[in-house]
Amino acid sequence: MKDEVIIIGAGVSGLSSAALLVKEKIPVRIFEKSPKVGGRTTSTSYKGHILDNGFHIMPFYKTSAVYKVLEEIGIVSDLKLSIVDDITFFQEKKFHKYPKGILDFFQLSIVPMKSRLKLLRILLPMAFTSMEKAQELDSKSLTEITKAMDEKTRSFFDAVCMLAFADTPDHVSLGEFVRTIIRANPFKGGTSEFGYPSEGGYDKISKILEEYVKNNGGIVNLSTPIKKIVIQNNYVKGVVLESGEFFPSNCVIVSNPAYIAVKKFFDDEVFDKKFLSKVEKLNKTTSVIEVHFCLSKKIDSRQIVFPVGSSYTAKGVFFITNIAPSVSPKGEHLVMAGTPVPSEYTDNPQMIREVVDRMKADISQIYPDFKENLLWEKPMAWKLVEAVVKEPGLVWKQKMPHNIEGIKGLFFVGDSTISYGIGTDSAAHSSMLCHPKIINHLKEKSEQEIQIKQN
């Protein structure tokens, strides 16, 4: 069917775009190469526990882009969320309160009193600046303001960056950091709270979106990889599946990583070398080692603990069962620890083992009864790609554009495209920004077809 919009990928961005379209009664067909929806947020079951593919969390809770998409299509009540706000630093054998608001900075025990005032003088102007001003800082590094700070204050920024960006300050744009502070400011309608599906499994968000799309006439084809997107005379004509079957469409939305898609799905002559070179800059990789631990005893009632300081390998300890009890069988407790690593570590089983053992030693130092209550562990290692594009010069409007000048009917969504934030928040934001452009294209195409019929 010619007016059917085709979407490649059933992650958060692809499903968000599909949901926004079917709400407007526009026919949609999704092709997803995997056997289930969710993309990088796909969860698995292991020994009765729900394991996420990494620690995912909804930033800014009810003001997040994901939440706004669910509100827009009227199904926000379908997603039951646990609030994640019991967050703590651990430094020098003490737990320190994580600041939930501006006033908490006066009681920020992890930072010396004199430094707290300096910190406030930096963060307060950020919290009350504008998004436009933040954009002017997109090419600067966060280290421009942290390099002159004392070690303990720098450690505070390390912990904040692990929570907000899953990375270290040297990989974070100052502009992106400022936008995060603005969005967390309650005096500007923001929040520092986070959300996680109370039923367990972050892909619950994608499953709810999938159900909405299907209930409103959309088609979701799983285990169906795409071979090629057909472009003729600068117009989208449809897609060819790996099976060879052709599906015509005058509107195709790509939610795969942009720099992969432009090389994988198109003939060589579609894009010029200058454009391809620009997109390739988005091919940034942050590698991570994380490990799930199952314990027979609850060793802490907190939700997240950040070990602070260079002596700790584990940069975050996430008590998943404390966040959503349904992820684990009764009497068992799921904990995840994680840390960024050089990319070569993820392909080396010995290095993975060494990092996991160091993280276990960190947790044992904080919780002496950790090892005696450990039932099993399951390490993971992978390279996170465009989900963590947040470096100076690679954020917000400096990412991949949603549409390519001169090619009609082709759109890109996802966290490698124009959007702010990272991960699912960025993916949903991208879909919201791109949606009006898709609608305008479909209206123009419809008007052209009417004129042709009248003539």
Image (cartoon, helix red, strand yellow):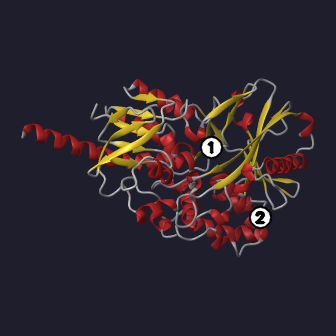
Q: Give the spatial CA distance, label 1 vs label 2.
A: 26 Å
Label 1, on which residue?
57
- The quadrant in which residue 405 appears is bottom left
Q: Is residue 144 above or below residue 240?
A: below
Quarter of the figure with the C terminus: top left
Density class for disc 2 (Cα within 10 Å; few <14, some 14-19, many ≥20) is: many
Residue type at mark 1 is Ile
Percent x, y for residue 23? 36, 33
Foreground residue, 54 or 60?
Answer: 54
Residue under the point 12% across and 41% down = 452
- The quadrant in which residue 251 appears is top left
Percent x, y for residue 227? 44, 40
Q: Is residue 353 above or below residue 127?
A: above
- The quadrant in which residue 160 appears is bottom right
Label 2, on which residue?
111
Residue under the point 56% across and 56% down = 185
Q: What element does badge 1 sit on?
A: loop
Query: Of label 1 and label 2, which has the lower sequence position?
Result: 1
Foreground residue, 156 or 295?
Answer: 295
Foreground residue, 411 or 112?
Answer: 411
Residue under the point 51% across and 35% down = 33
Question: On the rendered structure, is 402 left or right of 141?
Answer: left
Residue type at mark 2 is Val
Residue 15 visible, this orientation: yes
Q: Is residue 188 above or below residue 431?
A: below
Percent x, y for residue 412? 42, 49
Quarter of the figure with the N terminus: top left
Density class for disc 1 (Cα within 10 Å; few <14, some 14-19, many ≥20) is: some
